[in-house]
């Protein structure tokens, strides 16, 4: 039994692109972000958070910090010092409203990508806001026509079925659709020689690259955008319940499955020089996500993301040139 469990655990890591990428070394201009770049990056992301929060307050839209952003507020009163991304969550109805007002309120400064929305590209299963006056090329956005800028993520909060059987079925189907959608996206967006060479650096990466592309090829009779839209529609709660989940977060459908009152109504927390909204029972939320969330992980266990280039102020660079 122990041997079977170990094999299953190894297989899960092999088919998880995120796990494989965490253990892939840098290659040429595909590298980790430096500490100095993280500080500059956080300045731009803080500005984006403030603009999003202002629009949400203006229109009565509910938002909350998620993941490392929520953890940073509680543990560091701001960004986790080495954190290079921002995660927010919005109940589905609030996210839909935010997308509706985005172009009018923020379209001059930012670009939005999100599933199931006319006029906006689909870059992944989540909503992303890109700063137009910056350049930050990630591995995902390299060699395609997706936005290239400093960005933040917004994850939808969905109602989950109260019935255990219905919840298990919906969650399982959601995870299958999610893997198909991401594999289809991988097949379309990760076909460049540079990306292939990056994954080929390790045996695990090579396996994952071919496995993902094989699944993506099998479902390439539809575009990755349509698969992302299908997943996005499927996970939406059909009726209001007292159980919420974040299907697109790291833990997938079941990872942040908690009572509604863990999330809502939001409370306020410190974040750098602003006040940010947090899940209502922030302790329960962070224990579910991190366990002992006040523990500071050693350097070799801190997650970092890949980058291919940086410019925090395109206008200033253009004027300098």
Image (cartoon, helix red, strand yellow):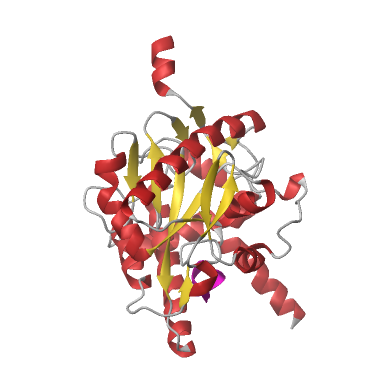
Whole-percent x, y for residue 152 in the image: 46, 45
Residue drawn at x 46%, y 67% as measured from the top left: 247
Q: Quadrant of the N terminus?
A: bottom right
Residue drawn at x 22%, y 48% as measured from the top left: 119
**Residue 93 on the magenta segment:** no
Q: Quadrant of residue 109?
A: top left
**Looking at the picture, does residue 300 appear above or below residue 157?**
above
- Say which of 194 and 84 sits in front: 84
Whole-percent x, y for residue 55 in the image: 35, 46
**Residue 254 on the magenta segment:** yes
Query: Magenta residues, as a range?
Result: 252-259
- Say which of 101 and 224 sits in front: 101
Res 41 seen here? yes
Res 29 seen here? no
Whole-percent x, y for residue 116 in the image: 27, 59
**Looking at the picture, does residue 108 appear above or below residue 7?**
above
Residue drawn at x 48%, y 27% as measured from the top left: 312
Q: Quadrant of the C terminus?
A: top left
Residue drawn at x 35%, y 60% as measured from the top left: 94
**Looking at the picture, does residue 161 appear above or below residue 177?**
below
Q: On the rendered structure, is 297 left or right of 80?
A: right
Q: Residue furthest top?
A: 321
Q: How many marks?
A: 0
- Say which of 7 and 175 sits in front: 175
- Say which of 56 and 141 sits in front: 56
Whole-percent x, y for residue 289 in the image: 62, 64
């Amino acid at each position: 039994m122990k041997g079977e469990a170990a094999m299953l655990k190894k297989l899960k890591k092999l088919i998880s692109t995120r796990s494989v990428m965490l253990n892939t070394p840098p290659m040429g201009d595909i590298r980790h972000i430096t500490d100095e770049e993280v500080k500059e990056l956080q300045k731009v992301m803080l500005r984006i958070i403030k603009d999003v929060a202002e629009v949400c307050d203006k229109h009565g839209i509910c938002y909350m910090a998620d993941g490392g952003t929520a953890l940073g507020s509680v543990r560091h009163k701001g960004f986790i010092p080495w954190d290079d991304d921002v995660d927010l969550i919005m109940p589905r109805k609030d996210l839909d409203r935010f997308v509706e007002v985005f172009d009018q309120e923020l379209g001059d400064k930012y670009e939005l990508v999100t599933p199931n929305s006319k006029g906006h590209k689909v870059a992944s299963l989540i909503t992303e806001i890109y700063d137009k006056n910056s350049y930050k090329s990630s591995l995902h956005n390299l060699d395609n026509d997706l936005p290239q800028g400093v960005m933040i993520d917004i994850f939808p909060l969905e109602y989950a079925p109260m019935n255990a059987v219905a919840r298990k079925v919906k969650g399982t189907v959601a995870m299958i659709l999610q893997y198909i959608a991401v594999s289809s996206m991988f097949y379309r967006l990760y076909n460049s020689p540079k990306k292939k060479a990056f994954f080929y650096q390790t045996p695990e990466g090579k396996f994952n690259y071919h496995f993902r592309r094989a699944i993506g090829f099998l479902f390439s009779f539809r575009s990755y955008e349509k698969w992302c839209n299908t997943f996005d529609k499927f996970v939406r709660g059909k009726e209001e319940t007292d159980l919420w989940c974040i299907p697109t977060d790291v833990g997938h459908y079941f990872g942040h499955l908690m009572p509604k009152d863990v999330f809502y109504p939001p409370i306020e927390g410190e974040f750098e020089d602003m006040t940010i909204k947090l899940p209502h029972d922030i302790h329960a939320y962070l224990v579910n996500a991190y366990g002992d969330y006040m523990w500071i992980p050693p350097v070799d266990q801190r997650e970092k993301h890949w980058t291919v280039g940086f410019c925090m102020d395109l206008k200033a660079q253009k004027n300098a040139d």
